[in-house]
Each structure stands twice: as structure tokens, then as C-alpha cells.
Image: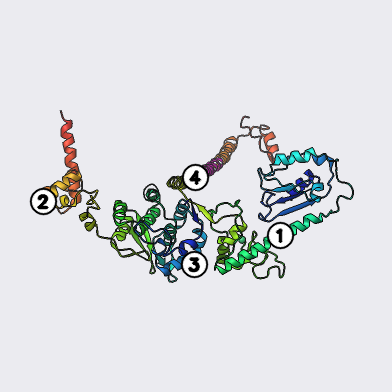
Amino acid sequence: MEMIVSILSLCSSMIILCPSSVWGNSEDSATTHRFHINNFEAPALAQPRPSFNHQQPCHCTYILPSSTLYNGNTTETSPLSANQFAAMSANKGAYETTASDTDFRKKYDRAEYAAKAAERESKEKEERKARYEAKLAGKKYHVPLTGNETLTEARASRLDVASNVGKVMLVPAGAATGKRGRGAGFYCQACDLTFKDNLQWVEHENSMQHLRAIGQTGEVRRATAEDVHDRITMIWEKIIDEKRADVKTLGERLEVRKMEDDKEREERRRKRRDLVEKKKAIKEEEVKVKKEYGDDVRIEGEHDEDDMMASMGIVGFGSSKK
Amino acid sequence: MAHHRADEKRFMDERGSSGPLAPNGLNPATIMEKPVRERIIDSYFWKDQCFAVNEADIINRVVDHVNFIGGTYGDAQRPSPFLCLAFKLLQLAPSDDILREYLEFGGEKFKYLRALALFYIRLTRQAKDVYKMLEPYLEDRRKLKRRTRIGTSLTFMDQFADDLLTKDRVCATTLWKMPKRELLEDLDVLEPRVSPLGDIEDLLESDPEVVEGNNGRRADDSEESPGSEFGEVTPEPEGIHVDKEMGEKEKEHDNDEP
Ligand SMILES: [Zn+2]
């Protein structure tokens, strides 16, 4: 959300369409984010903010500014770097608004809408035709390639089936009819479909329908002998590193253990020494007392002071020199 | 062709028709039997870990998931990761250069990668190449785990290579019938095989005494009692050891004296 707030503060009026996940860690990476901000005025926020950590270059398209947008002349540029983004919003003074007070109302360009509708209709008709032809040929219809698709790559890890186990997710009642929509099960964001089990899900992930939805061709780059050689080296080095790290942590653990043992032993030794010393001190005291009073020769008044202090509970001041 | 299809659909569709053939003239899509192929394609491992994998990615899969050789295992006859990846290799049809990387550079480090390459080569290469590429590994003594329908057992790389050269069926796959090595030698397609131990004929003809000498372990061997070379039978080897040591000590003493 922080992300969105900082965008809000940057742009006085724009619509941002972002088909990638660059907007923070928003979950739905493949869906379109649409923020519409009307005549946002905040002088202090016109400056680009350091917190604006938009990845660059990103894949988002922007449509700007609002006045041109409402006339139907949309400008699309992609990709757009964070710097450009910031510069753009800085150029436009925060107080400088070209929009008049009725500009927020939509102005319809009827001719253009009619053209757009016609275009859409012919496109749909074409698709229906292609679907029908594919069906006749006994094949499955797929949206034709645009040329912007990327190659398909092998999964880096196993499909993460277990990550949602044990989590409670609220699903709106009747949200999913059949596979369509978000329901209980494995959900595909790109296609807005839900699957009952991981087998169905992985089958979907592998399907042409899904690959086209995420802009992949379903083709895989062929590796050369050199690629193969490099991969072997890479895997081997990784394993060696992991082993070394293991040994290191084992070594470290032993080291720590040894230090703790030493400390403990030292502590015990100290306690023992203390005890011995205490005993020795008591013994010495006893001997001294015996020596001092042993002969039972008391000169009158010689020990009066000591006796008095002893009777008061004070036994010397720890000094053996008298 | 710079690309593979991520899935197997086209590969399977091409059976018996336009698909490229393996060097031994077989159609890679039908080298494994139909029930086995179906089991593989239906398996979760295939869908999850064999999708969109290329010649380099497959090494990761071998290292991460292959810890035994085998065809189908358990009561459910699940296809082993080894078999699934062999099927993937049939689809990828890697070149000899890549196979050499699997066998040698990679095979030294990852034994199951070598085992997989050996199996794949046996399925797709011409007889002379199968002999040439497999025979060096009859010297690889590393252990391999093998899993069958019944249970797990231990085997070795050399044993596995030998099975591939001599048996009819390995890892749920019927091996195509190769001409015998001798026949290929007679046809001058193959040179006679030279074992790293030396020529077998020489070994058999030579005097055992000489062989022992060649091996460089003779009277120095401390396990031998001093009298054994004269045919003496000594009842207590330990006693002899002591005697020998004492004898040596006495010798040393003798030397010490001027
Ligand atoms: Zn999908």
C-alpha cells in the first residue's frame, strides 16, 4: 500500500496500468492495476520522493495526462523508468492545472467510440471464425501469437502445492462457477480459474491456454553442449559450496561448544578454588583463635576491645595484622 | 531447429509419421512401449518436472530426483524418475556432443546422469556406437540402486552397462536387437576391444608367476610367512610375524655393531 500512496503523491492526475508485479508485493502479478486519481493537489508532494522505488525499467504503460485522456488521445509508452516518471510529474507544477472545473466530466467522442466498437466486433467475429475452423480441424483454438511472447522455461522448483495448506481463505459464496473465478482450490491468477487438485492445476499450468495468458510461446530454447557443460559445472560447484558451508557450520558449532565447555570448566574450577579458600580461611581463623586464646594467658585488658566487639557481633575487619 | 516444444504433444503426434528418427533408425516416440509411455505422461512427475525442460535443465532434474535406476516400481507400477527423464531425452534427442558431456564430464560427478545417458544411447544409437560409447564404463565400479516391482537391490555401473549390452529388457523397456560384437568385428565395423587389464589371451597364456611379478607384489607382501615360498606350512601365522619382526630387529642390531 505504501507503494500506491507514493504514486498518489507523485502524480496529480493519471491512470496507471501496470500488468506486472512491480507495484510492491501485490499478490496478483498478472492482473491490471488501475488507479484513477483526479486533480490531486499537494504542493509539497510534487517533488520526486526517495521512497519511490519503482523498478526500472518496468513494463507498465501509462496514460497521461487526464485532459488528453478525456479527449480520447491516449499516449502509451513502455517501458517507463522511474526517473522519467519522476521528471514528468516534476515538470508539471503542482498548482498548474490545465483542467477547467467541468473537465472531470467525460466528453464522449461518438465517432471514435463507434469506430472502436466496429473494430472490436470484427475482431470478435474473426476469433469466432478461427475457433470454429480449429474445431472443424479437430484442434484447440489458441489466441494468435503477437510476437511479444517469451520462451517457456522449466520450473525452478516443484510447483508449490503445500504453501496454502492450513491457511484459511475466505471465498465469497458462489464466486466460482465451475472453474471460472476464484474459488476453493488452486487458483490461477492469469486465467482466473480455480482447480480442484494439483494434478488439474499442473495440467493447466502446462496448457497452451495458460501459456498464452502469461505471454509464453510454449517453446523451449535448445541447449548446446557448452550450455550443458556449464550447467554441470554450476551444479557441481553449488554442491561443493553447500558441503563446505556444512563443514564450516559444523566446525563453528564445535568451536562454540568448546568455548562453552572451557567456560564451564573454568567456572567449576573457580568455585572449587573459592570453596577451598573459604575452608582454609575458616580453618586459619580457628587456628588463630586457638593460638591467641589457647594458652589461656590473658593479660588483663589486652583483649577487652576484641571481646567487646565480638560480643557486639563484629569479628575483626578482615585484617590479620594486629 | 532452435527450440523444443515444452510439452510432449507434438512428439507423441509425430509417431509413425514425420518425426525425425533416431540414429539407429527407430522412431523415438515408440521406442518405449505404449502402456509405459502412457504411465509416464500421466504421472505427476512428468507433468511437473519434465515440462519445458531442455538438455541442460535435465541435469538438475537428475541430480535432484534420480536416486535409483528402474522402470516402473511398486504395486502401482509408477514410472521411475529415471524412466521419465529417459523418455524426455527421447523427445529432446540430444546430440553426441551433449551425450559425451553427460557421460564423461557430468558422469564423473553424477553417476545417475551417466547411467541415464548409457540407457538412452542403447535405445537410440547404432550398434557400433553403442559398443564404443558403453564399453568404457564397464570399468566404472560405482554403486547404483535399482528399484523394481518387488523391491530395491544394489547394482553397479559396470553391471548396468553390461546389462545394456547383453540383456533384452532393461528398465521396463525392450532393447532393440543389436548384432553381436564379434559379428561387427568380422565385418570390420568395430576394432577388437582392448580391455584396460590387457589382452585376455595374454593373461590366460602367461605364467602365473610372471603375472604376480607384473603386479609388483611379491615377497614384500608382509602377509606371507617367510617359509611359504619353500612350500612350508606354518600353523600359526601370528607367531611367524613376531619371528619375522624379531629376525629383522636382530639384523638391525647386527648392522649397528661395528
Ligand atoms: Zn492459467
The mark closer to the camera, 4 or 2, is 4
Q: Amino acid at mark 2?
A: Glu
Helix, strand or loop at mark 1: helix
User: Residue at 12% of width from left, 53% of height from top?
Assistant: B233
Instruction: Please state the total of marks drawn on the protein image.
Output: 4
User: Residue at 17% of width from left, 38% of height from top?
Assistant: B250
Helix, strand or loop at mark 3: helix
Is the residue under label 2 in contact with that under label 1 (CB below 8 Å)? no
Residue A96's x, y, as percent?
Answer: 85, 40
Is label 3 within 8 A of ligand 1 (CB to nearest ligand atom)? no
Is the residue under label 4 in contact with that under label 1 (CB below 8 Å)? no
Q: Are marks 4 and 2 on the same chain?
A: no
Question: Does the stretch in magenta take in A316?
Answer: no
Q: Which residue is mark 2?
A: B232
User: Residue at 74% of width from left, 53% of height from top?
Assistant: A34
Q: Amino acid at mark 4?
A: Ala
Q: Which residue is mark 3?
A: B42
Q: Amino acid at mark 1?
A: Arg
Q: Amino acid at mark 3?
A: Asp
Q: Which residues are magenta?
A: A259-274
The mark closer to the camera, 3 or 1, is 1
